[in-house]
Image (cartoon, rainbow, N blue to C red):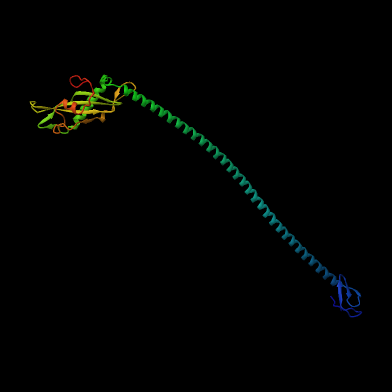
Amino acid sequence: MRLTNINCPQCDGQLYQQQDKFYCSSCGSAFNIDYDAADVEYAKLITEADRTRLLMESNRAILEKDQELRRKFETHETKQEIKQIVKTQGMTMLGSLIMYGIMAGLSSIVFIVVLVILISNSVRDSRQRNKLEDENEKARIERLEDLSGEDIAKDKNFIENTIAAGAAYDTSLRSSTTIDDLHLDGVPEAVGCYVVKEGTEISLYNIYENNFVSDDGEDNHLVYSCVLFENIESDETDHIQCDLKSCKRVQDGDFDAHWVGYESIDQIKDDIIPSGAYEIELEEGGVA
């Protein structure tokens, strides 16, 4: 390349380039550029390099733009997927909540219905039980009101059971079988039986004779005691009944504490048996 003077050859003014020509800033003269072969080749190289650079820059810009668009697209897709997942899960959860709510509501309704039925049945059963109890109590009171000493005396089995239970009870209370060198001979024998009725309260008094004898049989001593049976009733089949185990010995202040009993039957009648009691006749040996 040759270097040439770039001042205006006419007026020596400053030249400036516009495209492929130079122009004088003072006189306005125009000049063409004289390129030789080397300049043309160099210009081509510069042009190709610029084109390559521009193409690369353009491609890089396109790639960057494409990457940016891809990132935005992927971000958008991700957001859409997330939204879709959230939406799907939300719908699933909403459906589940609705289903659970319906099931819970149905369960509550079923529970309430069952509870109402159970309560109704319980109230009905309670009323029926109360009614039945009232009827049974009324019938029991009527039976007691109609029950007399004669009715009790007719139940031989009941009388004999009370006599046996009272004799066993009286014997068990006499812890010492020997008093004044005398011992109890056999079991107590029933010598009296009385029914006492006060309203619907019916009691039975059994009088027992306890015979204490000496070892040689030449000496003896009689002691009398009284055993009480309470709460006597009649069941639906007119059988007389009471709690035989709840019997108890009754005595007043005139009994002989040494012998734990009375000296005679009359003492028991006077001190213990209420007036107006119905006497049940017993056979010999204390049998009804």
| Residue found at x 18% / y 27% | 270
| Residue found at x 22% / y 23% | 193
The answer to whether residue 34 is above or below residue 96 is below
Q: Nearer the viewer, residue 176 or 98?
A: 176
Quarter placement of the N terminus: bottom right
Q: Nearer the viewer, residue 175 or 40?
A: 175
Q: Is residue 182 visible?
A: yes
Determine which quarter of the picture holds residue 71: bottom right
Q: Is residue 33 visible?
A: no
Q: Is residue 271 left or right of residue 47?
A: left
Determine which quarter of the picture holds residue 274: top left
Please state the horizontal and vertical placement of residue 125, each as a whole percent of the image: 43, 30
Q: Residue furthest front?
A: 275
Determine which quarter of the picture holds residue 49: bottom right
| Residue found at x 76% / y 62% | 58
Q: Is residue 251 left or right of residue 102?
A: left
Please state the horizontal and vertical placement of residue 50, each as a whole percent of the image: 79, 67
Q: Nearer the viewer, residue 269 or 151?
A: 269
Q: Nearer the viewer, residue 243 or 43?
A: 243
Please state the horizontal and vertical placement of residue 190, each as a whole percent of the image: 19, 24
Quarter placement of the C terminus: top left
